[in-house]
Amino acid sequence: MKELFRGAEAVIYEVNEKTLLKKRARKSYRIKELDEKLRKARTKNEINLLRRASSAGVCVPKVSGIEKYSFKMDYVKGELLKNYINALDEKELNCLFMKVGRGINALHGNNIIHGDLTTSNMILSNGKVFFIDFGLGSLSCKAEDKAVDLHLIKQALIAKHNRVWRKCFETIKENYNDAQVLERLKSVERRGRKKS
Ligand SMILES: Nc1ncnc2c1ncn2[C@@H]1O[C@H](COP(=O)(O)OP(=O)(O)O)[C@@H](O)[C@H]1O
Ligand SMILES: [Mg+2]
């Protein structure tokens, strides 16, 4: 199998043209028992969230071939949003971030917190925005947790797409339906400013 990406937590292998394998590799600095427990729990958590998101109608890769520390999923062919955004004009950005906003809205509407909303974890494929990498995700109905998730994508946009972040984030908010969460976001942002 060809290794495609190596992150801090996991390695992505190409199984074939249509399928990838995400495997959480052993961390030798962790005690063996703890390491196995963590990798198993994180793998299971990610699979559960991907399945739940899929049932909620959010575009995510379909999961198959589940094992203790790894799972297979559809290889989503397209562009990572990170590599794509800077080339777009205002109208194209609006169209793209409408899809991002609707996707996040649907995730949160089903109490799925992504946990790592960045433009490296979204892929534009056949005109649809796919969400990947639920490794840091969780389930929660709390407005606070959803607001923190929104704050994350805002920070990611500021850091990586500084020229256009405002417009992109505005479009996300316009397509986000939970007013209570948007209100909560204001206090999350105030706290963020105090910290920095
Ligand atoms: N289903 C997928 N289809 C296409 N590319 C993927 C898929 N899953 C992961 N990738 C690619 O692998 C990279 C790392 O995967 P990810 O799940 O985000 O792992 P990490 O937890 O290490 O960030 C992504 O940024 C993306 O480029
Ligand atoms: Mg990632």
Image (spheres, helix red, strand yellow):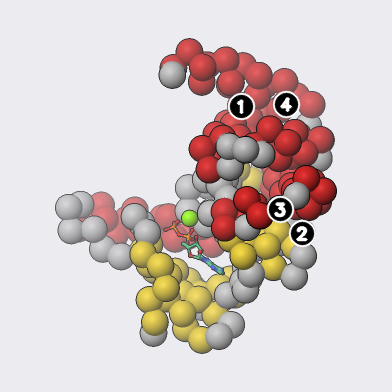
Helix, strand, or loop for circle 3?
loop
Helix, strand, or loop for circle 1?
helix
Dot 1 surroundings within 10 Å: few (below 14), some, or many (20 or more)?
some
The mark nearer the N terminus, 1 or 3, is 3
Helix, strand, or loop for circle 2?
loop
The mark nearer the N terminus, 1 or 2, is 2
Q: Is residue 100 left or right of residue 154?
A: right
The kind of residue on which mark 3 rests is Leu
The kind of residue on which mark 2 rests is Gly
Q: CB under 8 Å between callouts 2 and 3?
A: no
The kind of residue on which mark 1 rests is Glu
User: Is 30 above or below relative to 14?
Assistant: above
Q: Nearer the viewer, residue 113 or 101?
A: 101
Q: Residue 159 location, x and y as percent?
A: 51, 37
Q: CB under 8 Å between callouts 2 and 4?
A: no
Which residue lies at the image location 58% right of the left edge and 75% below the top edge? Answer: 75
Cα separation between marks 1 and 3: 32 Å
Cα separation between marks 2 and 3: 27 Å
Q: Quickly name the residue at label 3.
A: 88
Q: Nearer the viewer, mark 1 or mark 3?
A: 3
Dot 4 surroundings within 10 Å: few (below 14), some, or many (20 or more)?
some
The mark nearer the N terminus, 2 or 4, is 2
Q: Residue 177 location, x and y as percent?
A: 81, 35
The mark nearer the N terminus, 2 or 3, is 2
Examine the rendering and report whether any part of residue 149 can be seen.
Answer: no
Q: Quickly name the residue at label 4.
A: 182
Q: Quickly name the residue at label 1.
A: 144
Q: Quickly name the residue at label 2.
A: 57
Dot 2 surroundings within 10 Å: few (below 14), some, or many (20 or more)?
few
